[in-house]
Image: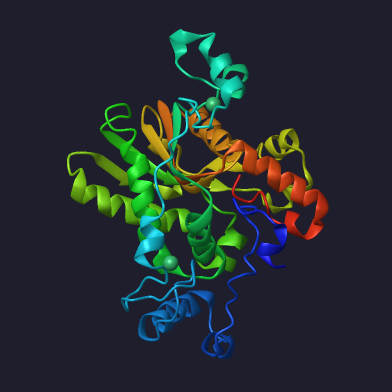
Amino acid sequence: MNDNSLGIDSGGPPGAPPGGVGDGSAMSRWWQGPGRVVRAALDDLVTTFYPTDCRACGGPLLRAGLSPVCDSCVDGVVEQSMTLCVRCGEALDMEGVRFAGQFPVDGLVCSPCRMAPPEFERAVAYAVYQDELREMIHLLKYERMRSVAKPLGRFLARAIRMLEGEAGGDLLVVAVPLFPSKERERGYNQAVLLSDAALAELKRSRPEWKLTAAHGVIRRVKDTRSQFELTPKGRRRNLQGAFAVSDRAALPGREILLVDDIYTTGATARACAQVLRRAGAAKVWVATASRAQPEMIAAWDDSALRDAGSRVAAWDAG
Ligand SMILES: [Zn+2]
Ligand SMILES: [Zn+2]
């Protein structure tokens, strides 16, 4: 499937394999034998020593380096500037702002958060999932370009900094887990790579903030890839029982920072937060590099109706 065939400029489904930027180099076609991890490393090497064009915009890569994406694409990713729900980070339209204004004490809270408050304190995201950022996330998740995790991790670090002064000074950082077979297939969990890059960056810029990676404390016990056919409510139901705690002793009384590459419907963040809180976590915070906003999700649903193929894995990011 060609991603461009969706006809959406603002972004396709977060889980759809990109067709536009094919992994068609002779080197990578030839090198099909070894495991994906080896091939991922080789792809990065090929990009390093045989720099081609920027994989996001097609412009020239002026600097030979590890990144397959040019500086201007990375710099083109800017912080969200809309009015956002203070709880989940959803962009509020005029009607949403008016609704939230009826309850001034709580600040601007969207109606879903008011009707069914999430078990996390707050979810923050750096930029809208579109354009260059969308391309970068696709490269990391479907084209095995591990090195894109570095700039994406910087975006995640900027999202985490939005919680400074609000979240505790001693946080356990947990990447949203993938189902084991999916992680094996991909060769890595992209959320862990982003987390590693973000924590390295924050160690330099915020040395006093104690952020400790604890990715193993929850695991995904249900393969939720099949949820593309479900309604939003069905997707939430499908995620029930999808996560389980692996290390109960680690959680009681602790503040957890849940991290991921993208926040889509919030179903994943809500499901993880519920499991973490039930195991005794005092508070759960959520930070992601990117955020899909409602009008884009509606567009994906429309395109999914037109093109059954595009529905495959469209909701894997939750
Ligand atoms: Zn570029
Ligand atoms: Zn909200």
Report x, y in % for residue 28.
Answer: 54, 85
Q: Is residue 302 left or right of residue 99?
A: right
Q: Depth check: 209 or 132 in front?
A: 132
Report whether 260 appears left or right of 199. right
Up-down: is 12 above or below 102? Answer: below
Q: Position of residue 171 (x, y in %)?
A: 32, 37
Q: Residue at x 61, y 54 (%)?
A: 9
Q: Please state the horizontal and vertical placement of residue 43, each as a whole percent of the image.
A: 46, 79
Residue at 44% across, 29% down? 122
Query: What is the quadrant of residue 1 in the picture?
Result: bottom right
Residue 249 seen in the figure: yes
Quadrant containing the C terminus in the rendered view: top right
Q: Nearer the viewer, residue 115 or 295?
A: 295
**How is the protein colored in the picture?**
rainbow
Task: Answer whether residue 213 is visible to the viewer in this image.
Answer: no
122 on left or right of 222: left
Specify the quadrant of the image occupied by residue 54: bottom left
Which quadrant contains ligand 1? bottom left
Quadrant of the image occupied by residue 285: top left
- Image point (52%, 26%), residue name: 119
The total of numbered circles placed on residues is: 0
Viewer-proximal residue among 185 and 246:
185
Where residue 72 sits in the image (x, y, percent)? 37, 62
